[in-house]
């Protein structure tokens, strides 16, 4: 009986480790990286550089979609892709408020910043 138990145990361990790795492979934004998700915020480019710039409806729609997962939204706003476009994190975090998104995650810590 012991001989049948060992292969079953090994198989169970392989399944557990593989499953655990697959779960950990998903980051803040699920299967996509924050840098990939940042491309959805292209309509927000000007609004993310200048707090006084108008925020387009397309930008607000993208922010609302990504903002359903606050940790993803933060990761996107702080991503290298966002910063390479000239987006300023301290300005980017104001966009949900500037879009008047009622259910935005007010007070959510986003790196060194807090969402207003």
Image (spheres, rainbow, N blue to C red):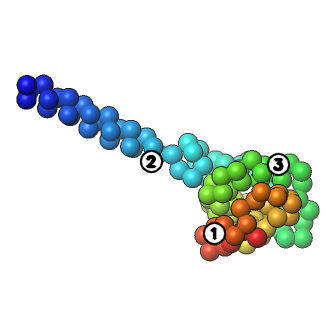
Residue closest to the far front:
1
- The residue under the point 57% across, 45% down is 30
| Residue identifier under label 1 | 109
Query: Regarding mark 1 in the picture, which secondary structure is present there?
Result: strand
Question: Mark 1 touching mark 3, by CB under 8 A?
Answer: no
Q: Position of residue 86 (x, y in %)?
A: 74, 65
The CA distance from mark 3 to mark 2 is 29 Å
The CA distance from mark 2 to mark 1 is 22 Å
- The residue under the point 65% across, 52% down is 69
Q: Position of residue 42 (x, y in %)?
A: 78, 51
**Dot 3 crowding, Cα within 10 Å, few <14, some 14–19, many 20+:** some
Instruction: Tell me: 113 left or right of 25.
Output: right
Q: Residue 13, located in which quarter of the rendered image? A: top left
Q: Position of residue 109 (x, y in %)?
A: 63, 69
**Dot 1 crowding, Cα within 10 Å, few <14, some 14–19, many 20+:** some
Instruction: Tell me: 56 left or right of 89.
Output: right
| Residue identifier under label 3 | 61
Question: Mark 2 touching mark 1, by CB under 8 A?
Answer: no
Give above or below for 107 relative to 55. below
Q: Nearer the viewer, residue 100 or 87?
A: 100
Q: Mark 2 or mark 1: name the one nearer the start of the chain.
A: 2
Q: Is residue 103 visible?
A: yes
| Quadrant containing the C terminus in the rendered view | bottom right
Q: Position of residue 91 (x, y in %)?
A: 77, 70
| Quadrant containing the N terminus in the rendered view | top left
Query: Regarding mark 3 in the picture, which secondary structure is present there?
Result: helix
Please give the label number shown on residue 24.
Answer: 2
Query: Regarding mark 2 in the picture, which secondary structure is present there?
Result: helix
How many marks the image carries: the answer is 3
């Amino acid at each position: 009986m012991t001989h049948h138990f060992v292969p079953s145990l090994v198989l169970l361990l392989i399944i557990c480790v593989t499953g655990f790795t697959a779960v950990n492979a998903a980051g803040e934004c699920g299967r996509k990286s924050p840098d990939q998700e940042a491309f959805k915020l292209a309509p927000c480019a000007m609004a993310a550089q200048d707090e006084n710039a108008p925020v387009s409806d397309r930008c607000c729609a993208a922010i609302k979609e990504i903002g359903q997962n606050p940790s993803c939204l933060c990761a996107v706003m702080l991503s290298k892709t966002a910063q390479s476009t000239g987006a300023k994190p301290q300005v980017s975090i104001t966009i949900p408020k500037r879009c008047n998104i009622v259910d935005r995650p007010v007070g959510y810590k986003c790196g060194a910043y807090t969402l207003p």
